[in-house]
Image (cartoon, rainbow, N blue to C red):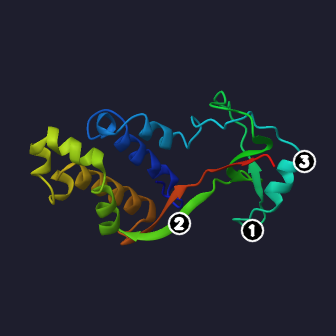
Amino acid sequence: MVFPKHPRLNHFISEYHSSGKDALGPYWAQPGRSIVEGLLDAVPFPVEPALTEQTSEVLSRLPNLYEGGYPVPERIHEPAPVGGTSGWDAASAVRIKRDSLGRQWFLHRDRWRWENLEGYLRTSSALNAFHEKHPEDAAKKGNGAQGDIVDRLVHRLREAIKKEEGKDVEEFDIAWPLVLMMVKREN
């Protein structure tokens, strides 16, 4: 999750998901969480991607998510292919994260209120595991800056946006990065 209009606040979310004080890092199911945080870079294709003219054709069929840009394949150090590699079209294997102007793709952009953010943060299994281990923290829920781990994060974010905007805001933009991975079977 990121704050597109307030990118300097994204570190608050990263810290919340990492290890340390006021962090859920040790309570996330692994390796799943690290794979998601790494935007699926650890997920291998069944074949080594071969960027070809066919790849360009595949990309030309994808929608332009932003004015002025078009999808481009992401060059990463691909994990080794897994499983049976036969039957897959390497020329169609493409991983896309951004457009030709370098802009990150987002799965969903929305305007949220603070209660939406708090509700979302309270749905994680990592928070439930954290509160099981730290019931004294769970008992603080609802006390703003002195509240539980979610209350403290929301308070810090709200104060940071207030500082950037010069006023308290009730709504803000939120988004999730998008990664598109495609590979087709050979005919």
Q: Residue at x 49, y 50 (%)?
A: 8
Residue 18 pos. (x, y %): 37, 37
Q: Does dot 1 land on a helix, a strand or a loop?
A: loop
Taking 65 as reference, is 30 above or below it? above
Residue under label 2, please give it: 109
In 3D space, how far apart are the residues under numbered discs 1 and 2 (Cα atoms)?
16 Å
Q: Which mark is residue 5?
A: none
Q: On the image, which quarter does residue 169 sit in? A: bottom left
Instruction: Classify residue 27 as left or right of residue 106.
Output: left
Please rate how many residues cluster around mark 3, counting C-alpha atoms within 10 Å: few if below 14, some from 14 to 19, many from 20. Answer: few
Taking 84 as reference, is 55 above or below it? below
Q: Which mark is residue 53?
A: 3
Please rate how many residues cluster around mark 2, counting C-alpha atoms within 10 Å: few if below 14, some from 14 to 19, many from 20. Answer: some
Q: Earlier in the sequence, mark 3 or mark 1?
A: 3
Do residues under tags 3 and 1 come within 8 Å of each other at their CB atoms? no
Q: Earlier in the sequence, mark 2 or mark 3?
A: 3
Q: Earlier in the sequence, mark 1 or mark 2?
A: 1
Instruction: Classify residue 85 as left or right of residue 17.
Output: right
Residue type, label 2: Arg
Could you say which is closer to the camera, residue 170 or residue 125?
A: 125
Could you say which is closer to the camera, residue 164 or residue 30?
A: 30
In 3D space, how far apart are the residues under numbered discs 2 and 3 (Cα atoms)?
32 Å
Residue type, label 3: Glu
Q: Residue at x 15, y 56 (%)?
A: 141
Please rate how many residues cluster around mark 1, counting C-alpha atoms within 10 Å: few if below 14, some from 14 to 19, many from 20. Answer: few
Residue type, label 1: Glu
Residue 62 pos. (x, y %): 75, 62
Which residue ends up furthest to the right in the rendered image? 53
Residue under label 1, please give it: 67
